[in-house]
Amino acid sequence: MTYANPSAGRALLRRSALAAALLCGALGAGLAQAQEPVKIGFIATMSGPGGALGQDQYDAFMLAIEQKGGKLGGVPVEVIREDDQLKPDVGVQAATKLLKSEHVPIITGVTFSNVMMAIHKPITDSQVFLIGSNAGPAPIAGKECSPFFFSTSWDNDMLHEAGGQLASDLGYKNMYVMAANYQAGRDAVSGFKRDYTGKVIDEVYTQVNQPDYSAEIAQLQAASPDAVYVFYPGGMGVNFVKQYRQAGLLGSLPLISVSTIDGSTLPALKSLAVGAITSAPYAPNLDNPQNKQFVEAFVKAYKRQPSMYAAQSYDAANLIDSALAKVKGDVSNKDALRAAFKEADFDSVRGAFKFDSNQFPDAPFYRVDVVEGPDGAELQASTPIKIKTRANFAAQCNMK
Amino acid sequence: MSFTLFIIQTLNGLQLGVLLFLMAAGLTLVFGIMNFVNLAHGSMYMMGAFFAASLYNVTGSFLLAAVLLVPAMLTLGLAVNWIALRKLYPRDHLDQVLATFGLILFFNELARMIWGPSPYYMEVPEFLIGAVNLFGVRYPAYRLVIIASGLLVALGCYVLIHRTRIGMLIRAGASNRAMVDVLGVNITLLNAMLFALGAVLAGFAGLLAGPIMSVQAGMGEPILILTMVVIVIGGIGSIRGAFYASLIVGVVDTLGRTLLPNLLRTVLERSAADIAGPALASMMIYLLMAAILAVKPEGLFPVHKH
């Protein structure tokens, strides 16, 4: 290119240089401002009968962020909340939105197993980290495990293995077992039997969302077992426990339950549930400093006791906090971020916490009693349960 | 199964039956007389349970809550009828189904906004706590009260329908609506009253169910489905039919749930019986409905239309 007028050429050159300098300046400023918020997707069941569980997860997650001044790992975070309405298809839509239009690097939450089964693959296939804080269906702990999935809760079988172990430890020889007639209910019974050494004198499956259990309760009285084991999550649990109490059984015929009496159903049961025994991964009275400050902050912020759903989600937030701090907010290096998650370098409200090879926690379960408390009743953890036989899903998970 | 257990299970069936009757009475009248499909009837049951639970928790008296519930449900019934439904009576059934389905969503969300997503607390009144020893098996006293009060309401309905002038108009309306209208009866007012009566009965069912069941958003839908089965079996528009069908459905459902799995275990292998038993038991009342409709397509006690 030649210029008829050299000075005009020089002027153009000068202007170009100026523009280039400005551009560089802008870029430099951009680099300095790498602290733009890290987006975190949150998917849970926020409405419908299961909505209380998702609300607990969300509240605890946001509490952790608030405690750290709107940051996790020293980086500002933006939480994008989605409600899956306990419908797998809605969950998939929410996940797609978070992946395709929000481009989030991390998704957390997930309340129910059916939703988890639907969204686990699309999320982990896109190499986005999924930090589950409740649902843990067996397949994703075993054969279909993924390097991009971490859990701060348990696999479904573990809940009931702990229940079976507890029944054995308490020395009950004859148990009467009841569950709702769906996959999780059947898994509950098989998990229970794995660690229960006594005799199951009868197992009864009732309709999902059955409101009235009077017939079954009369039946179980006639069978005169040593104790009763039930798995009735949500409203079913409220129905069953109320009716068990009204039949005059709670207090005379021991009731062991899992996912039946917890932070989400206790407000509806109050003193009616006193005397029941549960096996659970968490109770507000667990004695560790992290839990003490968590319970205090949660009660102050939301005027209610935290449930295990809240606790697990609080752990998820702190896990993300520890990992983001390790990678200094750089979420682009997936290997580094994964390694940081794997270390589980945070204080869990459940006490000791480390990841198994399938990236599910190796954390304790407790015998939790429903005792009289300020609001009628409260959950009180006592001895940890030592589960003897585990389904060992980690062995089926071949992940490096 | 021993004889005493059989008696207990029959009582359990009766108790479910009278709850169903309280629901079915209102639904069958509205359906049979106004020719109006009201899916929101389950929502009236839910609102009744929430109102009752709140009134009970605030006043501390179950009986006072029961008394205050009547005007509350009457107001709610009249308001829903006046605001949302009165324009829908002449429309076809599909429009009514859509509109009242919308009301279900509305009320569930409303309940969630007011009382929260968790189940709401409601306890059996103190003087009814405990179990009565019945033939060697302990039976909750409160459930006996449900049976008794349900039967009382049934008696009240019988007197209202067969012994009063309003009842005569209701029966006339069920047989020939146009003629009643022509004779100078204010059918709009009659409709509104009927709808409100249905709401009160459903609310009363909610009050009785509240202490034994989980009071939460969406609690009305499972019972609405059973109620629909009841009014179809009983014959749409017939209170007498609703009464007998409620008891039949209650007893068949309860005995089916307890007898069938045990029965299957004697003929099938244990594991197969455990899978087939609960599935078949949950189908029992629908099989019953299919069988009855095959023989009597109008239901057991059809209302004669002219």
Image: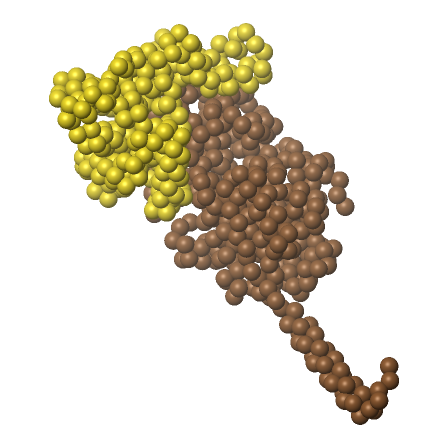
Residue A271, x across and y down, in percent = 34, 38
| Figure quadrant of residue B123 | top left
From the viewer's side, name the closer residue of B24 and A211: B24
Q: Colour of chain A?
A: brown
Seen at 54% across and 20% down, the residue is A199
Quadrant in which the C terminus of chain B is drawn: top left
Residue A398 can be seen, yes or no = yes
Residue B30, x across and y down, in percent = 28, 26
| Figure quadrant of residue B151 | top left
In the image, the chain rendered in yellow is B
Seen at 21% across and 32% down, the residue is B188
Side of B135 where A101 appears, left or right: right
Looking at the image, how many numbered discs can be counted on the residues? 0
Quadrant in which the N terminus of chain B is drawn: top left
Side of A120 where A18 appears, left or right: right
Residue A29, x across and y down, in percent = 66, 76
Residue B22 can be seen, yes or no = no
Residue farthest to the right, as pictured: A2
| Figure quadrant of residue B248 | top left
Residue B102, x across and y down, in percent = 39, 38
Q: Is residue A83 above or below residue A38?
A: above
Q: Is residue B23 above or below residue B243?
A: below
Side of A283 where B18 appears, left or right: left
Seen at 30% across and 13% down, the residue is B302
From the viewer's side, name the closer residue of B34 and A204: B34
Scheme by which the image is coloured? by chain
From the viewer's side, name the closer residue of A40 and A97: A97
